[in-house]
Amino acid sequence: MPHSCILIGAPIDSGQRRAGCLMGPAAYRVAGLGATLTALGHPTQDHGDVALPALRDAVADNPVVHALAETVGWTEALSATVQNALSEGGFPIVMGGDHSLALGSVAGAAAHAHAVGRPLFLLWLDAHSDFHTPRTTTSGNLHGTPVAYIAGRDGFEAFPPFPVPLPPQNICLFGIRSVDPEEHAALLEHEIEINDMRVLDEYGIAAPLRAFLDRVRAANGMLHVSLDVDFLDPSIAPAVGTTVPGGTTFREAHLVMELLHESALVTSLDLVELNPFLDERGRTAKMMVDLVGSLMGRKVFDRPTRSF
């Protein structure tokens, strides 16, 4: 079934300190994301880049927090944009930008899901759990906080209240391999499902993912997928400032996307942490576009021969 895809640029660098992610939306466009979706039969509109609104005062108790006012502004703007795209019957694809964009994109998806009376589920494809809060972060980088915000943890007083915090059984962290001790303890308290690379090595990609998708289907849920470049092993996706060895391979990542396509459950998507300044001749941007192609229906045997 074709989706009415809506491309939303989120040129966000405020969630971390390594410049370059703001170029991500342009890189996805140059890598042919819109053309890929259209070729697969999905009507596609590019709504351009979201603009940062006028900033209001925002204060954090933790002095190391970086760019709080900007991140709050992006959160408010993206939440409204994603909610509007979903209410229009669209399939929003948010092209980032660092992972702090998920503070807004998932909030917008949650607001829409609540409005239509369906539960929202979150599949977090990432090397990191991103379960810090503005109070607990030691780096001050707010791209490490979205899952905590989505799950309703305290410490986000500067942000708009999350519309309907997701219960732990609605959140699946997949491919995790770098978690701070404070985050780990908090995750255990919240009983969020963690499919780290140890789990995936032992049980494979398919079984844990299918179990989660079965829960989404049984609940008639909407599914937001947040795909971080560092979900992939840095040997195949170098354009990210938060590399962690031991990520998913090309084949594993495409299997995840094909299983998601076959489930027909995904209703919105983030593409985050692409830093074109760190890429090799557009290699990572092209791979991310290729993964979206698998999510939207391209089969593995449809792949062209590559020049690298």
Image (spheres, helix red, strand yellow):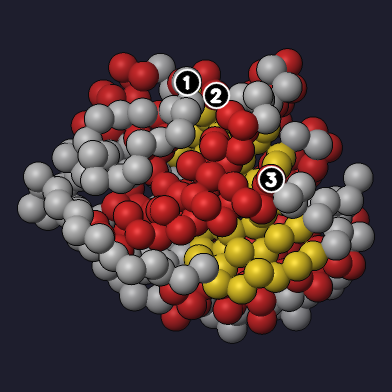
Helix, strand or loop status at disc 2: helix
- Check disc 1 and report the residue beneath it: 167
Within 10 Å of disc 3 (Cα), the crowding (few <14, some 14-19, many 20+) is: some
- Give whichever of 270, 156 is nearer the camera: 156
The three-letter amino acid code for the residue at tag 2 is Asn
Residue 97 rendering spot, x and y as whole percentages: 46, 65
Within 10 Å of disc 2 (Cα), the crowding (few <14, some 14-19, many 20+) is: many
- Give whichever of 215, 73 is nearer the camera: 73
- Check disc 2 and report the residue beneath it: 170
What residue is shown at x 30% (from left), y 29% (from top)? 153
Query: Mark 1 or mark 3, which is nearer the start of the sequence?
Result: 3
Q: Nearer the viewer, mark 3 or mark 1?
A: 3
Query: Mark 3 or mark 2, which is nearer the start of the sequence?
Result: 3
The three-letter amino acid code for the residue at tag 1 is Pro
Mark 3 to mark 1 CA distance (whole Å): 23 Å
- Check disc 3 and report the residue beneath it: 87
Mark 2 to mark 3 CA distance (whole Å): 21 Å
- Count of number-bearing discs: 3
**Image position of 132 with respect to 98: above or below:** above
